[in-house]
Amino acid sequence: MRTHGTIAVASGKGGTGKTTICTSLAFVADPPVCLLDCDVEEPNAHIFLNPQIEESRSVGIPVPRVDADRCTACGECARVCQYNALAVVKDRVLVFGELCHGCGGCRLACPEDAITEEDRPIGSLEKGRSGSIEFVHGRLEVGEALSPPLISAVRKAGNRSGLTLIDAPPGTSCPVIEAVRGSDFVVLVTEPTPFGVNDLALAADMVQALGIPAGVVINRSNIGDEKARRFCSENGIPVLLEIPEDRNLAEAYSRGDRLVDAVPGYGERIRALLARSGEVMG
Amino acid sequence: MKVVVSSSGETLEDPVDLRFGRAKYFLSVDTDTGDVQVVNNTQNVEAMQGAGIQAAQTVASQSPEYLITGHCGPKAFSVLRAAGIQIVVGFEGSVGEAVEALKQGRLKPTEGADVQGHWM
């Protein structure tokens, strides 16, 4: 069974079972295991892992601070800013920190060296353990639009010695790419519904563009139709596991139980999923 | 006196564009000479964020005393204010009518933004 490397669990559509699969994999894998909950807008893996948080820190992005004595209001900083976060009017620079992506372009462009950077907090990072599982997640501040820097911080905070499991945010845009890129394998969780299949196709395109091998878990596999299976076979993506809708699973999930122990047979399926992922990863 | 008006077209007969940051055009009008200059704002219409800030800099570069528009958010407002421009919001009618109303002293500058920002 695979004991090192990085497996990201992603999906196009939200609510397909990413966290369920990701935390279940963490429970059955041989230590050392590190789970990174990169869904920083709505982290929920901790509900299933119940980790002891040992470390907490603020994460920010560098936003410009302008030294008014050096600034000549030449406007170069505002010209290079792709995010319209700087405005130069009359003899001064206005900084709109909430629009800044922290790229540092303005600091490089300033001919007077008048720009330094200060951190603007966007969220917090918490690190801890649940038994033998190392755990890290991020919490994005409410109203904050920019999650990738926090996701990047969560990924860097993980221990890379054993198996790293990443619980990715839903969708296929920047936050997901930040969460999954550089991983060895992506498990795409879907459901056999029109929304599930539509978003699976988008997610499959995304991981292909990133050059990461992927396999699919079809959750609630006894509902909907055959389109998810057909999509996988037509596109050469292995279906690693199918999980039929099961009231016992739903009840255990709603209590926040460890599904691998609470529901007979489920732990075996997850072990098989981990083994198959390992085979596909090579 | 110089006045800039957000406009949905290139002439004084066109209606004032109710959007400021993503207005199609700005018409810069010199009320003494009757001179009208058209400033295209297409690039900002497509901006992913900060359209108001960018548009405010465009307007400020014309150095008008007044801006007449439909709505103005807080970030654009702070840039325009820093540039010393008086802002009139909520005007509905043509650009020409707006300039005329200002000349007759019927328009009152706003003390603050009249709409919320789009992000926070």
Image (cartoon, rainbow, N blue to C red):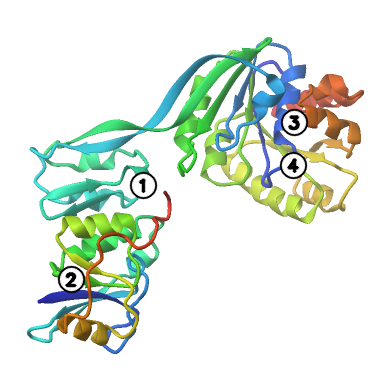
At horizontal 25% and vertical 55% (from top left) the residue drawn is B78
Q: Are marks 1 and 2 in contact (CB under 8 Å)?
A: no
Residue under label 4: A16
Mark toward the start of the polypeptide (1 vs 3): 3
**Mark closer to the observer (1, 2):** 2
Q: CA distance from mark 1 to mark 3?
A: 34 Å
Q: Nearer the viewer, residue A13 or A249?
A: A249
Residue B59 is left or right of residue A103, and the answer is left
Which one is closest to the eye, mark 3 or mark 2?
2
**SS assignment at label 4:** loop
For disc 2, the marked residue is: B66
Q: Are marks 4 and 1 on the same chain?
A: yes
Q: Nearer the viewer, mark 4 or mark 2?
A: 2
Mark 3–mark 2 Cα distance, whole angstroms, equals 58 Å
Q: Quadrant of residue A212?
A: top right
Subunit that carries the residue with mark 1:
A
Is residue A1 in view? Answer: no
Q: Of residues A212 and A51, which is closer to you in this image?
A: A51
Same-subunit check for callouts 4 and 2: no
Give the x, y percent position of residue B113. 31, 60
Q: Nearer the viewer, residue A192 or A3?
A: A192
Tell me which amino acid carries mark 2.
Tyr
- The type of residue carrying mark 3 is Thr
Is residue A145 shown left or right of residue A206?
left
Q: Residue at x 69, y 15 (%)?
A: A3
Confirm or deny contact between disc 1 and disc 3 (CB under 8 A): no
Asked if residue A131 can be seen in this view, the reply is yes
Q: How many marks?
A: 4
Which quadrant of the structure image shows residue B67?
A: bottom left
